[in-house]
């Protein structure tokens, strides 16, 4: 899959949500996801509107928004239609199946009702996927598993990562990909989308354990499919639109280099 285009992969993908994601990446010529970690509704909507034209996926942490309300969700959905991007609530579920089912479908956030994609840790075992799947699959949602984290000292390696990957392999109707630092696909019948956070062109860390790599390292060297960029785009003093364009171009140039190789 490393040399195939997103479009070619979309055409033969059995997972509906993965198919939609890959099609969108192809048509919009973007493998950029914005990690929009801001704490007010106003900032969230303003930045999403500015960056919308450049991204294929908007990643949220909805529980950090001080003034969250249902209107925020409605406006976010309107922006996703206006600019044609999908939404990924980075909830990082980590509990037993029965609990995550409610955390995904109920509460004030009702994540499953608006977020195309969400993610989970493999730590509780496969029941976490079964629980989330009961809620998400009928709605056409997709799940990512966290195979590897970007932060310093992360425990997501070796046996833990391989067992997580095996869980995904057994649930390919719902699990569409991974949060990972490297490409996972090894078997002939699998085409997981590899999304990689910890991406920045100007700095190597944030003083709180985050570690940044460049789009070239992520897409060409580690053969991931999508770059997830947060503060590199909207950090203090940055021109949000200019940075979004810069990362979209860097991500796309790297992808073109990879498929040409
Ligand atoms: N994220 C990581 N590393 C992971 C998984 N998720 O950084 O392994 C998420 C963070 C944040 C974003 O929760 O929302 O990706 C990175 O933001 P940044 O570019 O501003 O560091």
Image: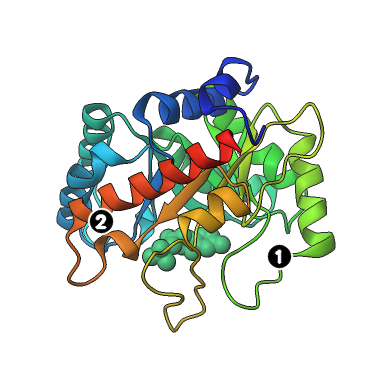
Residue named by callout 2: 243
Query: Marks 2 and 1: in contact by CB < 8 Å?
Result: no
Dot placed on the residue nearer the N-terminal end, 1 or 2:
1
Give the alpha-carbon distance from disc 1 to disc 2, as whole Å: 30 Å
Tell me the mark number nearer the camera, choosing from 1 and 2.
Answer: 2
Q: Secondary structure at mark 1?
A: loop
Residue 217 placement: quadrant: bottom right
In the foreground, 159 or 135: 159
Q: Is mark 2 within 8 Å of ligand 1?
A: no
Total numbered circles:
2
Q: Is residue 23 above or below residue 96?
A: above
The percent coordinates of residue 196 (x first, y second) are: 54, 53
- Colour scheme of the rendered structure: rainbow
The percent coordinates of residue 138 (x first, y second) are: 56, 22
108 sits to left or right of 174: left
- Mark yes or no: residue 88 visible: no
**Residue depicted at 42% across the width and 43% down the height:** 253
Q: Secondary structure at mark 2?
A: helix
Q: Is mark 1 within 8 Å of ligand 1?
A: yes
Residue that protrudes farthest toward the front in the picture:
261
224 sits to left or right of 116: right
Judge the density around disc 2: few (<14), some (14-19), many (≥20) Cα neighbours within 10 Å: some
**Residue depicted at 46% across the width and 81% down the height:** 208
> Image quadrant for the C terminus?
top right
Q: Is residue 203 above or below residue 108?
A: below
Residue that protrudes farthest toward the top in the picture:
11
9 sits to left or right of 254: right
In the foreground, 253 or 130: 253
The percent coordinates of residue 34 (x first, y second) are: 36, 50
The percent coordinates of residue 67 (x first, y second) are: 21, 58
Residue 40 placement: quadrant: bottom left
Q: Which mark is residue 156?
A: 1
């Amino acid at each position: 899959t490393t040399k195939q285009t997103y479009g070619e992969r979309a055409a033969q993908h059995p997972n509906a949500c993965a198919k939609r994601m890959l099609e969108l990446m192809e048509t919009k010529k973007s493998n950029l996801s914005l990690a929009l970690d801001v704490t007010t509704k106003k900032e969230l909507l303003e930045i999403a509107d500015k960056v919308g034209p450049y991204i294929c996926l908007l990643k949220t942490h909805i529980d950090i928004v001080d003034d969250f309300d249902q209107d925020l969700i409605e406006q976010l959905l309107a922006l996703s239609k206006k600019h044609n991007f999908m939404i990924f609530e980075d909830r990082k579920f980590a509990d037993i199946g029965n609990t995550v089912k409610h955390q995904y479908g109920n509460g004030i956030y009702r994540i499953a009702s608006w977020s195309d994609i969400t993610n989970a840790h493999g730590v509780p075992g496969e029941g976490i996927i079964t629980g989330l799947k009961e809620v998400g699959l009928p709605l056409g949602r997709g799940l990512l598993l966290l195979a590897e984290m970007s932060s310093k000292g992360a425990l997501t390696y070796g046996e833990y990562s391989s067992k997580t990957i095996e869980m995904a392999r057994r649930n390919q109707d719902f699990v569409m990909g991974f949060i990972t630092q490297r490409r996972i696909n090894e078997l002939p019948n699998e085409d997981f989308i590899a999304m990689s956070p910890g991406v920045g062109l100007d700095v190597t860390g944030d003083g709180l354990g985050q570690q940044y790599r460049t789009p070239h390292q992520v897409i060409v060297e580690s053969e991931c499919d999508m770059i997830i960029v947060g503060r590199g785009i909207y950090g203090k003093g940055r021109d949000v639109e200019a940075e979004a364009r810069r990362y979209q171009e860097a991500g796309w140039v790297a992808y073109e280099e990879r498929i040409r190789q």
